[in-house]
Amino acid sequence: MIDAVVLGAGPAGLAASAALAERGVEHVVLEGDRAAATWHAQRWDSFRLNTAGWMNSMLGGQARDAYASGQEVVQRLKQLAAGCPVREGARVARLAPAGDAWAVATDDGELRARAVVVATGDQNRPRVPALARRLPGRVAQLHAADYRSPGQLPGGTVLVVGSAQSGCQIAEDLLVSGGIRVVLATSPVGRVPFRHRGRETIEWLAEAGFMDQRPGDLPDPSVMRAAMPIIAPGRGLSLGALARAGATLAGRPVAVDGERVAFDGSLAANLAAGDAFAARARAMVDEVIRRRGVDAPPAEPDEHDLPVDLDPPALLDLRAQEVDGVVWCTGFTGDFSWLDPALAGADGQPRHTGGAAPAPGLWYLGLRWLRRRCSGILLGFPGDAAVVAAAVRAHLGG
């Protein structure tokens, strides 16, 4: 029997471990692979964080405006893990209540704990639509989790499906490599203007409490299911910019018939969704400036607001257009099949209220919108971990 167990040694699990240690809670961190495993395995070579150094304090000292590479993030997480009681290669097969404690079954046996923090994440299992199975066998297919560089794909044309953060950045990575044409199947995703009225927009928004919005603050709960808005490391990014760089924009793929892929007519609406989000972000900043009486300069011109000529294909002949590769940037989910069924909802995801499970002694960390808008990113892990660790200590009797 141990006081507490943390499941997962990614950034959320390491933040939980640090917060528990700070409060004197004896614990162990169980990791089925190695520390920061998905950061090792699911990032492309040119990947960089699209959040600046000031938003990633849990990674340690760095320049305020630095955008760390994937390799740097891995190294910093490994350093954090070295100071935590992490047991690597301890895959959890089952978590279930056991009296007034919890039974954690691993491949090597069972551990009992009075408290458990599940920090395995809900964005690490690739989602691929059923259409993928209908594509011709000659077409190479990768999910964003497996994409590393343009060299993995045949030359010619690549179809990128999905235009949220990964889709846009991978499309850009392919375009700048030279020699590869890109067709980008789009989706309705917001975009964040990089700068507005003299500062980075995200700085204004963070000060206004945007990143601390709670689920109950939202007039429309569907916002929690939306993809993260598009922004690139240290600059803006948009569908229009990708079109001007040479990408062919299309709507959402809806059917595959042999060598032909059909798209719906949603491109104009998808572009409009990005522009509308950008306008709302600017309006929020303008209101903050007005309310605080800040002497801020006028808005800067933004190339991403420029109109783009649209001529989206309704049908793409893969062979005629030399499409030999597809990258599915269609998102992730989490695998919680090892949870006791009573702990999960109909969708297989954990049931919780603000991170606390319905059963005493169990908490979650690192899930999107767990407590706040930033709960699923590096910015939010330490604060959420402090709340969970305090609850764990109280549960254990102080």
Image: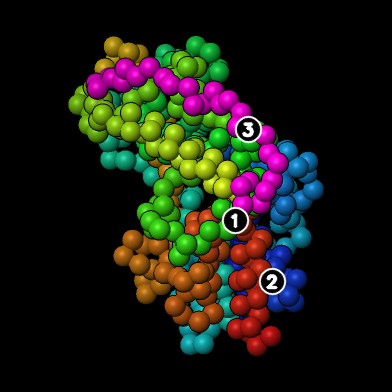
Q: Of the residues shown, which amino acid type is indicated by label 3? A: Pro
Q: Is residue 107 visible?
A: no
Whether the residues at callouts 2 and 3 have beta carbons within 8 Å, the answer is no
Q: Of the residues shown, which amino acid type is indicated by label 2? A: Leu
* Label ID, residue 20: 2
State the image coordinates of residue 247 (x, y, percent, origin top left).
43, 19
Rate crowding at label 2 as few (under 14), some (14 to 19) or many (20 or more) other CA atoms within 10 Å: many
Q: Is residue 18 magenta?
A: no
Residue corresponding to mark 3: 298
How many numbered circles are shown? 3
The stretch in magenta equals: 289-316
Residue at image position (26%, 29%) is 265
Task: State the separation of the CA atoms marked 2 and 3.
Answer: 46 Å
Of 362 and 248, the residue lying toward us: 248
Residue corresponding to mark 1: 209
In the visual, does 197 lie left or right of 375? right
- Secondary structure category for the residue under label 1: loop
In the visual, does 111 lie left or right of 55? left
State the image coordinates of residue 60 (x, y, percent, origin top left).
77, 51
Q: Quadrant of the N terminus?
A: bottom right
Task: State the separation of the CA atoms marked 2 and 1.
Answer: 26 Å
State the image coordinates of residue 166 (x, y, percent, origin top left).
49, 36
Q: Earlier in the sequence, mark 2 or mark 3?
A: 2
Q: Is residue 177 visible?
A: yes
State the image coordinates of residue 283 (x, y, percent, origin top left).
52, 43
Tell me: residue 83, above or below residue 129.
below
Q: Of the residues shown, which amino acid type is indicated by label 1? A: Gly
Tell me: residue 44, above or below residue 173.
below
Residue at image position (45%, 27%) is 239
Rate crowding at label 1 as few (under 14), some (14 to 19) or many (20 or more) other CA atoms within 10 Å: few
